[in-house]
Each structure stands twice: as structure tokens, then as C-alpha cells.
Amino acid sequence: MAAMLMRTDPFRDLDRLTQQVLGGPGTRARPSVMPMDAWREGDTFHVEFDLPGVSSDSVDLDVERNVVTVRAERAALDGDKEMLAAERPRGVFSRQLVLGDNLDTERIDANYDAGVLTLRIPVAERAKPRKIEIASNGRGRQAINA
């Protein structure tokens, strides 16, 4: 799995701690973190992001080379409300994933349903195991797994 996904956000835990201590939703300058799960199943890499209460219109997905950026926004509540509890972060959510070169970012399939953004990224053909035939002098051909 390490070759599939490289963690590039060393400040994520610090950001979570800061939010817990100082409170407050994410802003454009300090986005909130969106929880995710990632796994490989056969020749497909799966990633799921939890974005409950986020409109599908506010979800944005960009790919540049092998970097996938997910950005979403949960709208703020009206200022006329007297908040009794405010535990759900509001504002901008952003997450970047650096994918390994063995994934085909040209063929990402994305779906947003019930507050979960699901990405399916196929393993690149060049990264799949294949057999190479080797000829020998006077002998039959042999297949060797590469």
C-alpha cells in the first residue's frame, strides 16, 4: 500500500490539535481535515472521503500529475441562530493525496453519494505484472514472469 499512496501532510495532526484547543471551523487559510479510508482491491485503488452535510455542488476534485486535491465546503449557518452546540466544523475542507506512479490518474472514477466521496483509481497497465518470453539458442521459448 505504501507505493500506492504517500502521506504528504505532516501538519495534519497539529492542525487537528489546534482546532480542538482553539476551536473554530476551517477557513480558506486553514482548511479542516476530511477523514478518509484507502485500500487496494485487485487492480483498483479505492479512496473514500467523509463529507456529511456537504452539497455535491461544493465538492471539487483536481488532478495534476500524481497529486489529487479534494476541496469541499460546508456552508455556515445563519447568524440569527443561538447555537447551543457547535461540534460540526463548517467552512472549507481540503485534502491532497500524492499517488504512486503505479496508478492511472487519467482514468479516475469519482462518485458522491450519501456524504461520501468515492474515488476508484485503476492500477496503471505498465505497473501490472506481465510475462516476457525469452528465446534461447536452439531451445524452445520460455515464459518468465516480470
Image: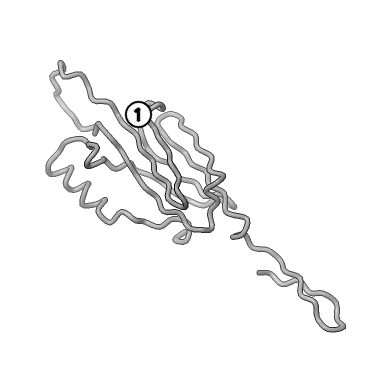
For image coordinates 39% across by 32% down, the residue present is 59
Q: Is residue 41 above or below residue 86?
A: below
Q: What colour scheme does the image use?
A: one colour
How crowded is the residue under tag 1: few (<14 C-alpha within 10 Å), some, or many (20+)? some
Expressed as whole percent of the image width and height from the top left, the position of residue 91 reads 25, 32
Three-letter amino acid code at disc 1? Val
For image coordinates 16% across by 19% down, the residue present is 79
Q: Which residue is mark 1?
A: 54
Q: SS for tag 1?
A: loop
User: Which residue is most to the front?
Assistant: 64
For image coordinates 85% across by 81% down, the residue present is 139
**In this picture, residue 138 sits left or right of residue 127:** right
**In this picture, residue 134 sits left or right of residue 22:** right
Of 31 and 22, which appears nearest the observer? 31
User: Which residue is most to the right?
Assistant: 138
**In this picture, residue 78 sits left or right of residue 38:** left
Could you tell me which quadrant the C terminus lies in?
A: bottom right
**In this picture, residue 18 sits left or right of residue 104:** left
Expressed as whole percent of the image width and height from the top left, the position of residue 17 reads 18, 48
Count of marks placed on residues: 1
Of 84 and 26, which appears nearest the observer? 26
Expressed as whole percent of the image width and height from the top left, the position of residue 88 reads 24, 32
Expressed as whole percent of the image width and height from the top left, the position of residue 24 reads 16, 36
Q: Is residue 104 above or below residue 137?
A: above
